[in-house]
Image (cartoon, rainbow, N blue to C red):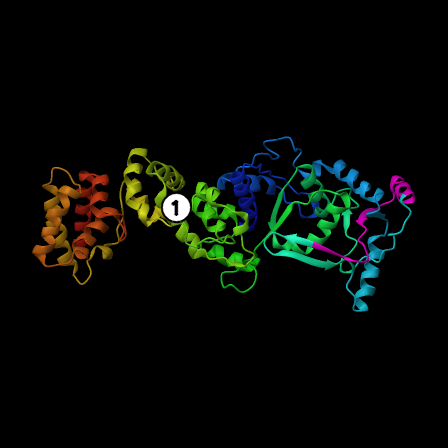
Amino acid sequence: MHLGSARSALYPFLLARRTGGTFILRIEDTDQKRFVPGAEQELIDGLHWLGINYDEGPDVGGPCGPYRQTERREVYHEYAWKLVELGHAFPCFCTPDSLDKVRQEQMKNKQNPRYDGACRNLNPDEGRRRAASGEKFVIRFKMPKEGSITTTDLLRGPSTTENSALDDSVLLKSDGLPTYHLAAMVDDHLMEITHVIRGSEWLPSLPLHTHIIRAFGWEEPQFVHLSVFLKPSGKGKMSKREAAEAIQDGHSIFVGDMQSLGYIPEGVLNWIALMGWGVSEGDVLTLDDMIARFDIHNLTPSPAAINFAKLDHFNATHIRLLRTDDLAARIKPYFLREGLAVADTKLLKITPLIRERLVTLDDCLPFAAWFFKETVEPKPTDLVAKNLTAAQSVDIARKSLEILSGLPEINPVTAEPPLRALVEQLGLSPNQVFGILRVAVTGQTVSPPLFESMEIVGKEKVLERVKKAIEMLEKI
């Protein structure tokens, strides 16, 4: 499930919630050559993770079921033959070899390859008889040869296509399954779909789809074809190669990857929503905000470049909006995966200290994993303050240890004033003095606020770690 699929689901979800409509998940799985085991569950899991909850679907049921098109083949057979009876379709018995020969000949003559109409005027009764006898066939739409058709896309307005430019497309395949062209139009009618919001790759098929709907005499849904996603450079559509390069930089266009890379659904949704929705690109929106503000007429057909920096911005912003207990629960699994024992009370104290530094949830590890370790292993060279010698650094560590040892407890109120006074007394910068303590206590050069961190670690361990740092400095 990629971000295009997610956006194609998000907009109808917002429309349904905004207007009191029904949002349906339909699994269009009739192209069995492209069937991927597990893809349906991945789609369902992705929608649930994003919070795009549907009212009807294969796993929840509903009055419009079944929701997998492979489970509705009898319905499509009925409607395909109904089109034959109405004179708008015909069974075609041409073999793949004969069709390929015609196609090769057309290409040789510099003609657009298309069906040559060999079975177009076959007697319907003969067609039914041959089909009933077991002869292999498909059912094709009988495209009018004359005139034109005017279709309407809600974002782009009306467009007229000459019928002579359209082919006799296959509606029912030889394996008995329908093509998307028939199945989706039938299901849209039977499920009383009012709005079809889909990718722009379906725009060239809109004349055929409109022909099919009108051949049945049905009411047409409103069609919206969303803007194209461009690669980050803005030049051309995102390809598999660019997607592979992005994942190496910690980004992905696939929802499952985004989840494992530490993105949160709130940030991903905000990012996706604004690519093709004509509101300010900097707007920070929750799902409830989106529902309240959504207007289908504000969607735009302009191509949208994928900007991973904006994804990072929105993700970090939404992380900061989470309640402390919620954020703590979301980062806890990252620590557990590292084999760390995590006490919830300690985690709740740590979470506010690292919240502002998180872009993705997995950023919690470099900032806070050390909290859950019994010992830390600083690099001896990191304990030497900038522009100072090891001897000067060890002197600072000893003076700091003396101050910390004399405190009843270590916290920002008790520890920061006397240590700042030490900084003044020595004529050094806070970074030099506090940097030594930071490495000693945390084992790393970058950490959450020092004094708050020392309070969580506790006086006994702080003193123990500073003493160990002094021993390391003495050996340099």
Q: Secondary structure at mark 1?
A: helix
Where is residue 239? Give x, y as percent: 57, 59
Decide if residue 215 is in sight here.
yes
Q: Which quadrant: the C terminus?
A: bottom left
Camera-side residue: 462 or 267? 267
Q: Is residue 98 above or below residue 37?
A: below
Residue 84 falls in image quadrant: top right
Q: Residue furthest bottom?
A: 109
Camera-side residue: 153 or 354? 153
**What is the span of residues highlighted in magenta in the rendered image?**
125-150
Let me know if residue 177 is in the magenta part: no
Number of numbered discs visible in the structure rendering: 1
Q: Is residue 326 left or right of residue 402?
A: right
Q: Is residue 45 left or right of residue 319?
A: right
Mark 1 surroundings: few (<14), some (14-19) or many (≥20) residues within 10 A: many
Q: Is residue 284 left or right of residue 166?
A: left
- What amino acid is at disc 1? His
Camera-side residue: 11 or 147? 147
Where is residue 409? Give x, y as percent: 14, 38
Residue 78 falls in image quadrant: top right
Decide if residue 45 is in sight here.
no
Which residue occupies 77% across, 56% down?
Answer: 167
Which residue occupies 87% across, 55% down?
Answer: 118
